[in-house]
Image (cartoon, grey):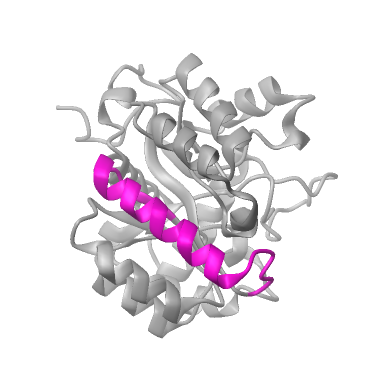
Amino acid sequence: MALIDIGANLTHKSFAHDFESVVADAVEAGLAHIILTGTDLPTSRAALALSTERPELFSCTVGFHPHIAQSVSAADLNAADELSALPEVVAVGETGLDFNRNYSPPERQLAIFERQLQLAVALQKPVFLHQRDAHTAFLDLLKRYRCDLPGGVVHCFTDNEAALLDYLELDMYIGVTGWICDERRGELLQSLVAKIPDDRLLVETDAPYLLPRTLTPQPGSRRNEPKYLIEVLKTIAYHRQQAVEVVARHSAENAIRLFGLRKRLKSQQTGAGSLPEGQVS
């Protein structure tokens, strides 16, 4: 069973001391590919370097998280434009809106979000999106560009049913994280996950964040890792009343299709890195 984690922050400082063992554990757990998330210029550059070194295992995104929108300069945007055009970069983002904490003013978040949407259109690459407590403004802006975008994923979806249906109506993919494993905060997502069509479901860890609370026993560290993607898959499968293998196959197929991963995965051998049946022509 091949697994694809469509969003992991492995350039985070918490992985600096044991990065190789984290990667080895992920491969042993069955991960065939990990998309490394760029949230600012330094993390985007670091993710790109890893994706260039190990293209069979890693690809990446390049973008600016809404939290840092206020500090993004014209030079940063121009640098990201150049990076995003490279083949190792499979999506523009993480980008979007976060009105929950408003670390950056909403108007600046909107400006950077729109700039990233314009870049995705120009490059014809999908978008890797963040939205929290900003659905109306987020949807309005996304709608303006959706017909010109090749696709995208609303990453780490935690919103309500109305928002889910809005995104599905725009033919967006939905990323589900370990939030669904949280008995406190994940109840709504647990009730909604079965409403995501098989061909629009993506699975991610968002490591080092959102360690699944259903892990037994709980690890000593609160750091999440890609190897725990299987726990997210198990919880999704339970609430969708599907076999874990079915959820894994659909999510891998969707990731390959959205992010254009076929050539990268085609070079892998059988075993932990094998593709779902029918993925290699």
Outermost residue toward the bottom in this view: 162
Q: Is residue 194 left or right of residue 130?
A: left
Measuring from the top left, give residue 42's x and y in whole percent. 62, 33
**Residue situated in front as seen by the camera: 190 or 122:** 122
Q: Is residue 173 above or below residue 182?
A: above
Measuring from the top left, give residue 161's x and y in whole percent. 42, 82
Outermost residue toward the front in this view: 74
**Residue situated in front as seen by the camera: 15 or 233:** 15
Measuring from the top left, give residue 22's x and y in whole percent. 67, 29
Q: Quadrant of the C terminus?
A: top left
Q: Is residue 160 above or below residue 210?
A: below
Q: Quadrant of the N terminus?
A: top left
Q: Is residue 194 left or right of residue 47?
A: left
Q: Is residue 78 left or right of residue 49?
A: left
| Residue drawn at the location 47% of the way across and 39% of the way down | 62
Residue stretch rendered in magenta on the structure: 100-128
